[in-house]
Image (cartoon, grey):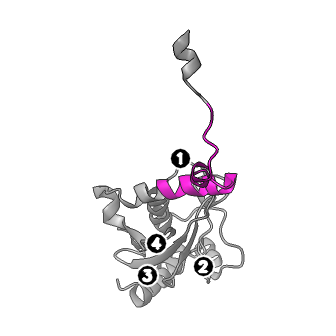
Amino acid sequence: MGIFRTLSFRRNTSRAAASNKPKSKESSVSWCGEKRLLKESQMQDEILKTYVISRLASPANVFRWEANLIGPEDCPFENGVFAVSVHIPTKYPFKPPKIVFNTKIFHPNINENGVISIDILGSQWSPTLRIDLVLLSICSVLSNPVEPFVPSNPAVKVYLQDRNAYEKIARMWTLEYANA
């Protein structure tokens, strides 16, 4: 019994110990997200690198990424290089990133400001998704637009009424703006 009397299981409540604790639930979530993003930014996948080249915009901020998406084969965006910005919330992975095309593109899921509208960046977001896989999914959407389309986007009307005209315009924009 003597050994149990000498052991102390008291919590260390010193100032030094308190400074190591997260200040709030949000800072704890932010720290977890930061740790995960650092790990994600170092992942290398050969298949993924064919279509997505991603990097931290600054090593000091893991919540901002930049990426180049390579247009998939057999679609109007083939061989185009599309620059995107990835803004990751501090509540990641519980909240989806916001992804914006910096390269002008004619597509029913991407508005004139470059904001992409797909379900996995909204109602179908899952914390199991990784940034690189979301970017790869966006590459897939380039060749196969998905509903719901962006309201009031001129590309939607052309896509729904005349697929050949849509592909011609999309290819022309790819050649002009995406270095294809």
Circle nearer the N terminus (4, 2): 4
**Residue, x 46% and y 86% (percent of image)?**
173
Quadrant of the image for the C terminus? bottom left
Nearest to the observer: residue 112 or residue 175: 112
- Is the Cβ of the residue at disc 1 closer than 8 Å to that at disc 2? no
Q: Verify whether residue 162 appears in magenta.
A: no
Tell me how far mark 1 sits from mark 3, CA to CA: 34 Å
**Residue, x 42% and y 71% (percent of image)?**
59
Task: Reply above or below: 106 against 24.
Answer: below
Tell me how far mark 3 sits from mark 2, CA to CA: 12 Å
Give the residue type that dot 4 points to. Ala
Closer mark to the observer between disc 1 and disc 2: 1
Q: Secondary structure at mark 3?
A: helix
Q: Residues within 10 Å of mark 3 (few under 14, many from 20)?
A: many
Nearest to the observer: residue 65 or residue 5: 5
The segment highlighted magenta reads 10-35
Tell me how far mark 4 sits from mark 1, CA to CA: 24 Å
Tell me how far mark 4 sits from mark 2, CA to CA: 38 Å
Give the residue type that dot 2 points to. Ala
Q: Which residue is mark 3?
A: 171
Give the residue type that dot 3 points to. Arg
Q: Which residue is mark 4?
A: 60
Q: Which residue is mark 2?
A: 155
Residue 93 location, x and y as percent?
58, 53
Q: Residues within 10 Å of mark 4 (few under 14, many from 20)?
A: few
Circle nearer the N terminus (1, 2): 1
Give the residue type that dot 1 points to. Thr
Circle nearer the N terminus (3, 2): 2
Closer mark to the observer between disc 4 and disc 1: 4
Q: Which residue is mark 1?
A: 128
Number of numbered discs visible in the structure rendering: 4
Circle nearer the N terminus (3, 4): 4
